[in-house]
Amino acid sequence: MLFGKEHVRRYVETDGAEGHDWQGTTVLILTMTGRRTGEKRSTPLIYQRHGNDHLVVASHGGADENPLWYRNLEAHPDAEIQVKGDRLKVRARTATPEEKPELWRIMTATWPDYDEYQKKTDRDIPVVVLEPVT
């Protein structure tokens, strides 16, 4: 997580005026269903747009396991994102091996540390495509 629950609360309450712009990049709030509890969970993530989709990276700072939010999305791919004041229903999917190189370049252009995180682990860090649900 980029910052704590208090920051998530302020992002939501201020429609992203506090928290959307962060260290030279942009952050959204992803709200998904917990795979074990069934409760809603929110986490801030660096994102970029790709057409109508939003992209996020399940880097977990280069840890050997995927982050909890990614595991939650694997179990329950229907989620919601907040980008500034806009809230959108999305369906999450992991980028295919064919599309990942292009999407990885987009994400490392906004957060170069992703390349360093990948070097720390043997796992293939997923790029997650958040597709709008109409």
Image (cartoon, rainbow, N blue to C red):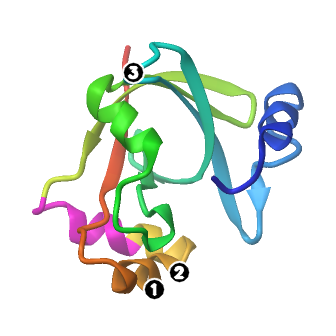
Q: Residue at x 89, y 31 (%)?
A: 14
Q: Where is mark 3, residue-wise?
A: 36
| Residue contact at pointers 1 and 2, CB within 8 angstroms | yes
**Disc nearer the start of the sequence (3/2):** 3
Q: Which mark is residue 31?
A: none
Q: Which residue is mark 2?
A: 113
Between marks 3 and 2, how big is the CA–CA gap? 31 Å
- Quadrant showing the C terminus: top left
- In magenta, the rendered stretch is 97-105
Residue 99 is inside the magenta segment: yes
Q: Position of residue 77 (x, y in %)?
A: 32, 26
According to the image, label 1 marks what residue? 116
Residue that protrudes farthest toward the left in the picture: 98
Q: Secondary structure at mark 1?
A: helix
Residue at 73% across / 37% down in the picture?
84
Could you say which quadrant of the image residue 54 lies in?
A: top left
